[in-house]
Amino acid sequence: MAKFDCVLLDFDGTVADTSEGIFEGIRYGIRMEGLPQPSPEDMRTFIGPPLNEGFRNHYPDISDEQVQQLIIHYRARYSVDGYYKFRLYDGMEDLLLTLRKEGIKTGIATSKPQVFIDHIAKTCDLEKYFDVIVGADADKLDSGKKEIIEKAFNMLKPSGCEKPLMVGDTKYDILGAKNAGVPSVAVTFGFGSVDEMIVAGATYVAKNCEEIKNIVLG
């Protein structure tokens, strides 16, 4: 019998490598606002937290209005074709199909705006892998990961979700799960720091999709 009966996964850096489209949008917004471009390594830290927090981390002296303008530029660029610039990580499709075959509920819990993740799922045929897909409220700059995780699990509960698990690649996923009272898996193939995820309280660490599967199935 499986150790967990429902599994939520972050999208960017966990289900898929989405960096190309995201980085293009971020660099476009920064260029439009005339700000200095981050290094390639610093760009990785934009994936995980809400976008406003990412801009704040890199440009602490800019105004709230400029943060909002950066997000507007990013979304304008990303909505052109950034949606489609991603690839599922090796073994992810097999993992998702195996979990569904075993009767384990699956879902996405992402800080990506709901409108974006819905569009990706529909146009790229990802809906078949998930029972629920929950993103952030595009009108709220500070949609927290805890609230996103809780919303997704509450949607799953009526169909059976007594032993939940969250899988993510950044400390935001791990802290969100911890604050929601849910055990978590920190994956090492995404964009976040493994050390930060361990400090944040990750229950498990997985190097690949096979290890995630073994954790879920016990």
Image (spheres, grey):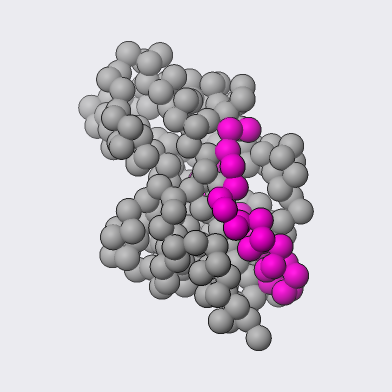
The image shows residue 112, relative to residue 62, as above or below, that is: below
Q: Residue at x 41, y 23 (%)?
A: 27
Q: Is residue 57 left or right of residue 24?
A: left
The image shows residue 104, relative to residue 134, as above or below, that is: below
Judge whether residue 68 can be spotted in this image: no
Q: Quadrant of the N terminus?
A: bottom right
Q: How many marks?
A: 0
Q: Residue at x 29, y 30 (%)?
A: 39
Q: Residue at x 47, y 25 (%)?
A: 24
Judge whether residue 214 can be spotted in this image: yes
Q: Position of residue 76 (x, y in %)?
A: 55, 21
Please tell me in which quadrant of the rendered image residue 124 appears.
top right
Q: Residue at x 75, y 70 (%)?
A: 101
Residue extending farthest to the bottom is 1
Please state the extent of the stretch shown in magenta in the rendering. Answer: 84-112
Q: Position of residue 102 (x, y in %)?
A: 72, 74
Residue 126 highlighted magenta (yes or no): no
The image shows residue 21, relative to residue 155, as above or below, that is: above
Q: Quadrant of the C terminus?
A: bottom right
Q: Position of residue 91 (x, y in %)?
A: 60, 58
Residue 102 highlighted magenta (yes or no): yes
Q: Position of residue 135 (x, y in %)?
A: 58, 47
Residue extending farthest to the left is 61
Which one is nearer the viewer's eye here, 149 or 39?
39
